[in-house]
């Protein structure tokens, strides 16, 4: 099937990028003055964060697409994207806490960006819990609505927590003077995480559609038995 | 549109109110035990003490309102479904956005009552002594703004949640994270009022005012899709 | 699809291995030792210089170990979370495909 061929290509690209990124980060990227080796965390941390935002925007947009076109594929993409985004969110939080521990000797210091990612993670946890509790057309419709609401709230959450934290954490606390090679590293990190996201999301989407097919077939079989 | 609002108001007011009020009271009480006036070190006195207590009071106040709100939203949405009220109203040809506004108004009334009742309680339990009638009026103003926003969000999410899973825990998981920016704004705006100080938090006040508008916009656009049957 | 997962799994794990081996040759340079030694010597004027250098080296080694540990921890998180999720999807996919095939055969067999 051409879908399989496409998935294989995406997978190969994604995981070659992972290899490339790892090689780059661990051999060519310069050592930063303050945090030295531990600073390398941030290539994948920022990459995951950016991808998480992307994933949630995709969820919202495909929510709109579903409401307009009522195509189950659109909802499958929305749900898959939210789930993968949630996984990436987990990565962002874990790496972020490790970063905080190595830089400031505390696992959590209410840094506004990380805190807002925590809230977003929780919002999408709600989305996923909700999705698993309903089935069928209602699930698709309600998830789309909730996904749109969540997407609209993301900037509000981000800016309100940033405002809230601005007194404790002057903006210079996080990333500062960046060596040009670091920018390349960041770009590579973001690209890599996005490629892996695409692979995971499309795979998850197919999974969702397969699950639907199984459900319909199962219904048919039980109906025929009667 | 008026008809829709009236019906919604009448129906819901009596059902949820008592339990919700009681719950809010309990929340304030429990928090007073855990984080009440004794939480602030005795060395801190005078204005600083009042400010610290006001911050605590403000936070607990809004937590109580938010949690009580979740209960109220859930009961209201659940009642809708159980009694088939929504279907009936829809068959009568009432617009989805009118229904939404009706819900928001009735929830605002319920939560508004909770807010009002919690003011003297919070002031008493947290010992913010300088609180006067003018402060109470200011707080009512702030609280109303916050409550409209909360209700707009809560009524919307509750319809989603009950349309789907149906349990209160699901609603809290879905609604509370979304409420966080609003709760931050509300607490920030209420704290100076509890301390009897002038309100300076322009940014937060703006958010508090803008939030319900945003929610209404979204609600009007999306509620139609929520109510489809 | 199996082949795809296998290839990716390998690449994924391989990149982890690369990361580890690339990090292992860590060392401290002479300049850092010199700087640290100066600091130590200042607060301990009576310490013999050999001891000062030893203290400097061990302090720097300790700090580096700490940093590298956190680096390793962070990357461990990334790899386990991603890897775990991939394993999860792969397993679900396998099960669903099997179920689908089974049901399809059922439907094909039935007369209607």
Image: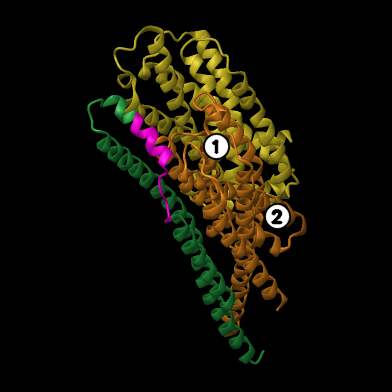
Chain colours: A orange, B yellow, C green
Q: Quadrant of the C terminus of chain B?
A: bottom right
Protein chain holding label 2 = A
Q: Quadrant of the N terminus of chain B?
A: top right
Residue identified by numbered label 2: A62
State the SS at label 1.
Answer: helix
> Residue A113, labelled with which disc?
1
Q: Residues within 10 Å of mark 1 (few under 14, many from 20)?
A: some
Image location of residue A74, percent across then percent down: 70, 60
**Above or below, comparing residue B211 to residue A145 in the picture:** above
Image location of residue A135, percent across then percent down: 58, 62
- Same chain under badges 1 and 2? The reply is yes
> Residue C26, labelled with which disc?
none
Is residue A37 in view?
yes
Instruction: Give whichever of A5, A162 is nearer the camera.
Output: A5
Is residue A146 in view?
no
> Residue, x 40% and y 17% (percent of image)?
B52
Where are the magenta residues, as a range? C24-38
Instruction: Give whichever of B184, A118 is nearer the camera.
Output: A118
Real-space Cα separation, disc 1 to disc 2, in angstroms:
26 Å
Left or right: A154 as drawn, with respect to B78: right
């Amino acid at each position: 099937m051409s879908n399989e061929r496409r998935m294989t290509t995406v997978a190969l690209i994604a995981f070659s990028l992972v290899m490339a990124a790892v090689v780059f980060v661990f051999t060519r990227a310069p050592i930063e003055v303050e945090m030295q080796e531990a600073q390398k965390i941030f290539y994948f941390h920022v990459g995951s964060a950016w991808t998480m935002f992307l994933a949630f925007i995709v969820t919202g947009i495909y929510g709109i697409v579903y409401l307009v076109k009522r195509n189950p594929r659109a909802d499958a993409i929305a749900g898959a994207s939210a789930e993968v985004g949630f996984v990436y969110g987990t990565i962002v939080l874990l790496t972020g806490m490790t970063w905080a521990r190595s830089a400031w000797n505390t696992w959590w210091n209410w840094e506004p960006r990380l805190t807002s990612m925590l809230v977003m993670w929780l919002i999408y946890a709600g989305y996923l819990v909700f999705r698993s509790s309903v089935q069928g057309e209602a699930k698709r419709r309600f998830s789309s609505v909730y996904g749109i609401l969540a997407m609209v709230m993301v900037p509000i959450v981000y800016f309100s927590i940033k405002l809230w934290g601005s007194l404790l954490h002057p903006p210079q606390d996080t990333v500062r003077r960046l060596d040009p090679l670091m920018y390349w590293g960041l770009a590579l990190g973001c690209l890599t995480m996005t490629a892996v996201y695409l692979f995971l999301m499309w795979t998850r989407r197919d999974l969702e559609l397969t699950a639907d097919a199984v459900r319909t077939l199962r219904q048919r079989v039980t109906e025929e038995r009667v | 549109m008026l008809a829709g609002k009236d019906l919604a108001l009448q129906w819901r007011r009596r059902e949820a109110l008592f339990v919700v009020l009681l719950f809010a009271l309990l929340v304030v009480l429990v928090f007073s035990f855990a984080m009440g006036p004794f939480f602030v070190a005795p060395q801190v006195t005078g204005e600083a003490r009042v400010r610290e207590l006001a911050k605590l009071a403000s936070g607990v106040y809004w937590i109580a309102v938010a949690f009580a709100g979740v209960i109220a939203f859930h009961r209201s949405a659940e009642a809708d479904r159980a009694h088939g009220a929504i279907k009936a109203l829809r068959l009568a040809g009432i617009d989805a956005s009118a229904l939404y506004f009706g819900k928001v108004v009735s929830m605002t009334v319920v939560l508004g009552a909770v807010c009002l009742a919690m003011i003297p309680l919070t002031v008493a339990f947290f010992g913010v002594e300088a609180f006067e009638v003018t402060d109470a009026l200011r707080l009512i103003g702030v609280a109303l703004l916050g409550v409209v926003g909360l209700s707009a969000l809560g009524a919307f999410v509750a319809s989603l949640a009950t349309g789907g899973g149906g349990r209160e825990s699901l609603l809290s998981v879905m609604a509370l994270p979304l409420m966080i920016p609003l709760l931050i704004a509300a607490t920030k705006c209420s704290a100076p009022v509890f301390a009897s100080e002038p309100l300076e938090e322009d940014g937060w006040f703006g958010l508090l005012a803008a939030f319900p508008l945003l929610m209404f916009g979204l609600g009007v656009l999306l509620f139609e899709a929520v109510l489809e049957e | 699809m199996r082949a795809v997962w296998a290839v990716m799994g390998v690449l994924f794990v391989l990149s982890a291995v690369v990361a580890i081996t690339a990090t292992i040759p860590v060392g401290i340079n002479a300049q850092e030792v010199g700087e640290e030694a100066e600091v130590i010597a200042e607060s301990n004027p009576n310490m013999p210089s050999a001891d000062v250098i030893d203290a400097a080296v061990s302090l720097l080694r300790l700090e580096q170990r700490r940093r590298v540990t956190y680096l390793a921890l962070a990357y461990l998180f990334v790899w386990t979370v991603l890897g775990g999720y991939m394993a999860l999807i792969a397993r679900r996919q396998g099960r669903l495909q099997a179920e689908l095939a089974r049901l399809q055969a059922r439907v094909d067999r039935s007369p209607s």
